[in-house]
C-alpha cells in the first residue's frame, strides 16, 4: 500500500524498477512513467531501483529463483508483474472471473462498517452547515430557467437496488421531452441543454451536494463507483460482462474512476471504467479513499472531467 500511495501522489521523478526475464513481462513496456531496467543475468546487481518485478507465476529457472530470494533477503522489494501493473495504472483488468478473483475483490467488511458511520456524520454536517448555500443555489437555478431546483433520476445502487438520486438541476427541464430515454441520460461535451449556472455547478461539482440526502438514507457513500442511470445500467449490462459486480459496494459521489477518467458514456469508455472500479473494490481501504478525496478537491478547482 505504501508503494501504491507513492504512485497515486505522482512523484516528480520516474520510478526505476528492474525486470526479471521470463513469463508475461512484455505488458510492462506499455506502462508510462517508469524507467525499466532489464536484467540479463542472475549474477547482475540491480542499480538504484525501488524494486524488482517478476512474473512469479512463470516457471523461472532455479538461478533466477535464487536471485529473487536473494533480493528479498537483502531488503529489495520483489513485485509480481500483475500487481505492479495494477499499482502503476490504478486498474484491474478482468476479462473473466475466477474463484480467486472473486475472493480478491470482496471489500474489507470492517472498513465497510466504519466508512458507513463516517459517511453518515459527514452528510449530516454538510446538510446542516451548507443549508444557506443550498438555498442560494436553488433560488439561482429557479430564476435562470423554469423547472425544479433539484434533478431526480433513478439510479442503480448497492447490490443492484434502485434508488432516486438527487442533484441540483444543471439543464433546461423543458428541452428533453421528445428525446429517447437513453439519450436523456447521456451528457455529451458541449451539451446545449446545460444552463449557465449549470456549467459552473458541474465544473465545481457543487451540483452533487444534494446527494448528502442519499448518503444519510444509506443509498450512497461519499466515495465509491459512480451510480449509473437505470436505463444506462441495463444497456451496459447487456454489452459488458461482469458489469453488475461494481454494485458490491455503495456508489459514491466521487470515486477512483471519476478522478482518473472523468465523465464517460460510450461502452468502450465504460469498459475501461470497470477496470478502475474493480481496482477500487480490490484495494478498498481508508488510504485509497484519502487519495480519492485529495484528488477530488483538486478536480473541483480545475474542473477536470466536467460535462
Image (cartoon, rainbow, N blue to C red):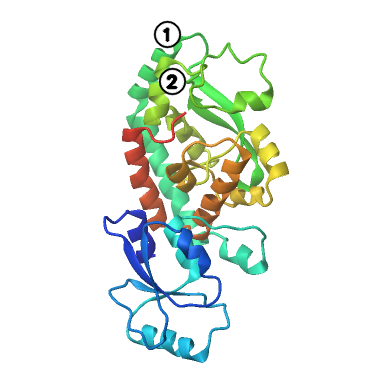
Task: Please determine whether, in this image, residue 40 is positioned above or below residue 26.
Answer: below
Where residue 165 sits, quadrant-wise, is top right
Label 2 to label 1, Cα distance in Å?
A: 12 Å
Tell me the residue that label 1 is attached to: 143
Instruction: Tell me the mark number nearer the camera, choosing from 2 and 1.
Output: 2
In which quadrant will I find the N terminus? bottom left
Q: Which mark is residue 198?
A: 2
Residue at (48% x, 87% y) in the render? 65
Secondary-structure class at tag 2: helix
Task: From the viewer's side, name the closer residue of 150 and 243.
Answer: 243
Image position, residue 200 (x, y; %): 38, 23
Q: Residue at x 42, y 8 (%)?
A: 143
Q: Is mark 1 on a helix, strand or loop?
A: helix
Q: In this view, does 59 lie above or below 254?
A: below
Examine the rendered structure and indicate whether residue 206 appears above or below residue 157. Answer: above
Name the side, left or right, on which 273 lies relative to 306: right
Q: Is residue 238 left or right of residue 19?
A: right
Residue 71: quarter of image: bottom left
Q: Residue 226, can we see it? A: yes
- All told, the count of numbered labels is 2
Amino acid at each position: 500500500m505504501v508503494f501504491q500511495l507513492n504512485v497515486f501522489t505522482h512523484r516528480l521523478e520516474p520510478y526505476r524498477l528492474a525486470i526479471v526475464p521470463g513469463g508475461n513481462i512484455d505488458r510492462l513496456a506499455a506502462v508510462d512513467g517508469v524507467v525499466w531496467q532489464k536484467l540479463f543475468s542472475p549474477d547482475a546487481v540491480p542499480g538504484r531501483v525501488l524494486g524488482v518485478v517478476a512474473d512469479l507465476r512463470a516457471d523461472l529457472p532455479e538461478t533466477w529463483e535464487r536471485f529473487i530470494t536473494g533480493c528479498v533477503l537483502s531488503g529489495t522489494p520483489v513485485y509480481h508483474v500483475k500487481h505492479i501493473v495494477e499499482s502503476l495504472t490504478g486498474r484491474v483488468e478482468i476479462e473473466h472471473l475466477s474463484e480467486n478473483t472473486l475472493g480478491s475483490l470482496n471489500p474489507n467488511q470492517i472498513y465497510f462498517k466504519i466508512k458507513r458511520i463516517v459517511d453518515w456524520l459527514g452528510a449530516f454536517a454538510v446538510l446542516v452547515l451548507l443549508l444557506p448555500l443550498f438555498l442560494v443555489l436553488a433560488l439561482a437555478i429557479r430564476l435562470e430557467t423554469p423547472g425544479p431546483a433539484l434533478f431526480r433520476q433513478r439510479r442503480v445502487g448497492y447490490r443492484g437496488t434502485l434508488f432516486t438520486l438527487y442533484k441540483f438541476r444543471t439543464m433546461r427541464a423543458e428541452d428533453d421531452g421528445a428525446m429517447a430515454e437513453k439519450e436523456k441520460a447521456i451528457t455529451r461535451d458541449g451539451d446545449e441543454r446545460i444552463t449557465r449556472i449549470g456549467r459552473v455547478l458541474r465544473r465545481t461539482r457543487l451540483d452533487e451536494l444534494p446527494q448528502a440526502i442519499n448518503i444519510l438514507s444509506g443509498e450512497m457513500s461519499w466515495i465509491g463507483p459512480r451510480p449509473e442511470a437505470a436505463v444506462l445500467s441495463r444497456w451496459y449490462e447487456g454489452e459488458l460482462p461482469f458489469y453488475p459486480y461494481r454494485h458490491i459496494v455503495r456508489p459514491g459521489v466521487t470515486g477512483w474512476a471519476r478522478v482518473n477518467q472523468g465523465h464517460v458514456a460510450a461502452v468502450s469508455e465504460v469498459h475501461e471504467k470497470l477496470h478502475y472500479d474493480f481496482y477500487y473494490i480490490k484495494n478498498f481501504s481508508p488510504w485509497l479513499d484519502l487519495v480519492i478525496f485529495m484528488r477530488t478537491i483538486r478536480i473541483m478547482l480545475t474542473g477536470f472531467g466536467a460535462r
